[in-house]
Structures are given as C-alpha cells and as structure tokens.
Amino acid sequence: MKIFIANFILIFHFLYVFYIIGGFLFIWTGFIFKWRSVRNRWFRWSHVAAMGFVAAEAIAGIFCPLTEWESQLRQAGGETSLYPRGFIPYWVHQVLFYDWPVWVFRAIYIGFFLLLILTILLIPPLRRDEC
C-alpha cells in the first residue's frame, strides 16, 4: 500500500509540474491564436499561485514535501532502487528529478515565477466585468 501511495504522489507531482509548464505554453499559444480561454482569471491566478508556492519553498530553503513524502513511503515500503516502481513511475521520476545543485533549482523556480508575473502583466486575465 505504501508503494501505491508513493506512486500516486509521484503522478500528482508530475501533473502539478505539467500544470505549471503546460499552462505557461497554453497561455502563450492562446495569446498568439487569440483564444479567450487563456485569459480566464481562475486559471491564471491558480497558475501563478501554483508556481508561487514552489518559488516560496525555494526561497525559504524548503525541500518539496511531495518529494519527501514519496521518498519516505518508498523507503518504508522496502524499495531501494528505481526499477521496482514499475514502468510509468520510473519514467515519471526520470522526467521530474535531476541531479543538479540546489542553487540551480532555486534560480529556475524563482526565474520561472518572475516569468509568470511578467506574463500576467503582458497577457492579463479578464476582469470580472469582462467575463
């Protein structure tokens, strides 16, 4: 059961990252093609908030809780290597995790958050009276 929950956390983590990166690409693609949906304020503010949470963790020096929980569950479940996880969890893990210094991740997270703030300014969400 612990490995199942660890896999669930890993997939959720992947979807969280996909929401941030995919959402950014969706916003700019929609801007180019004039899609009104990319200006949805709930989507836009939740998107910035999702990355803001990651950037705040980086600034505070907090290790991602999803990564911590997954690792703890895998160890409690007896896993010692990547391969026992199964095909999909293995590849999701390969896509999400890199062996770079912490400062590199911190710079990427903060830089991407600032890019999202710039995107909010350049492609503002619709105001309440425009919906």
Image (tube, rainbow, N blue to C red):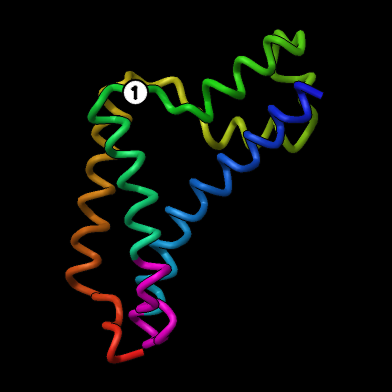
x then y, percent, for residue 91 = 67, 35
Q: How many marks?
A: 1
Mark 1 falls on what kind of element? loop
Look at the image and give the residue range highlighted in magenta.
Answer: 31-44
Query: In the displayed image of the protein, which residue is found farthest to the front?
Result: 128
Which of 86/44 is in front?
Answer: 44
For the N terminus, which image quadrant? top right
In the image, is 44 to the left or to the right of 97?
A: left
Predominant secondary structure in magenta?
A: helix
x then y, percent, for residue 93 = 61, 31
Which of 80/49 is in front?
Answer: 49
x then y, percent, for residue 52 = 30, 46
- Residue 15 located within the stretch drawn in magenta: no
Q: Residues within 10 Å of mark 1 (few under 14, many from 20)?
A: few
Task: Identify the residue at image location x=24%, y=65%.
Answer: 119
- Residue 40 located within the stretch drawn in magenta: yes
Task: Identify the residue at image location x=28%, y=27%.
Answer: 104
Give above or below for 61 relative to 48: above
Quadrant assignment, res 84: top right
The residue where tag 1 is placed is: 62
Query: In the displayed image of the protein, which residue is found farthest to the bottom?
Result: 130
Task: Identify the residue at image location x=43%, y=54%.
Answer: 21
Amino acid at dot 1: Ile
x then y, percent, for residue 45 = 34, 63
Give above or below for 22 relative to 60: below
Quadrant assignment, res 94: top right
In the image, is 21 to the left or to the right of 109?
A: right
In the image, is 95 to the left or to the right of 34?
A: right
Give above or below for 106 relative to 47: above
